[in-house]
Amino acid sequence: MLLAFIGGIFLGFLFFYSLDFGIKGSEKFKNSSLFIFLASLIRIIVLLVGFYYLSQNSGRNFFAALVGALASRIYIVYFYRKNRK
């Protein structure tokens, strides 16, 4: 269960930092909406596959991974608000 939590933290950081990459990277492309759509699709697929492998058919492991991803989101939001000031 601890491994699922740590994996969830990793997935959360990967998901939310790739969100930042997608927003900043869209300025470089002529068709930015297509880039944002594809980046979002890839991000969601990676997150769902990661949750699937971390859960190992156990609701507890899935919940631990989900809490880890949410914890990384809370940290990232706090970090961005702190740097913005």
Image (cartoon, rainbow, N blue to C red):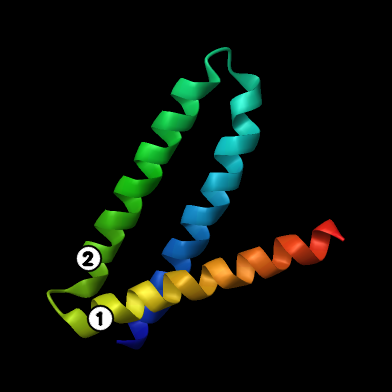
- The answer to whether the residues at label 2 and label 1 have Cβ atoms under 8 Å apart is no
Q: Which mark is residue 53?
A: 2
- Going by the image, does 35 lie left or right of 75? left
- Going by the image, does 51 lie left or right of 79? left
Check disc 1 and give the amino acid type. Answer: Asn
Q: Quadrant of the C terminus?
A: bottom right
Residue 51 placement (x, y as % from top left): 28, 64
Residue depicted at 65% across the width and 35% down the height? 24
Residue at the far right in the pictured view: 85
**In-front residue for pair 18/73:** 73
- Going by the image, does 61 lie left or right of 71? left
Residue 18 placement (x, y as % from top left): 53, 47
- Circle 1 sits on which residue? 61
Circle 2 SS class: helix
The quadrant holding residue 59 is: bottom left
Res. 4 in view: no
Mark 2 and mark 1: span between their CA atoms?
A: 10 Å
Residue 8 placement (x, y as % from top left): 39, 71
Residue at the far top in the pictured view: 30
Q: Which mark is residue 85?
A: none
Check disc 2 and give the amino acid type. Answer: Tyr
Image position of 45 with respect to 2: above or below: above
Image position of 20 with respect to 61: above or below: above
The quadrant holding residue 4 is: bottom left
- Badge 1: residue crowd in 10 Å (few <14, some 14–19, many ≥20): many
Residue depicted at 53% across the width and 46% down the height? 19
Res. 18 in view: yes
Of the numbered discs 2 and 1, the one sitting upstream in the chain is 2
Residue depicted at 82% across the width and 57% down the height? 84
Residue 64 placement (x, y as % from top left): 33, 81
Circle 1 SS class: helix
- Badge 2: residue crowd in 10 Å (few <14, some 14–19, many ≥20): few
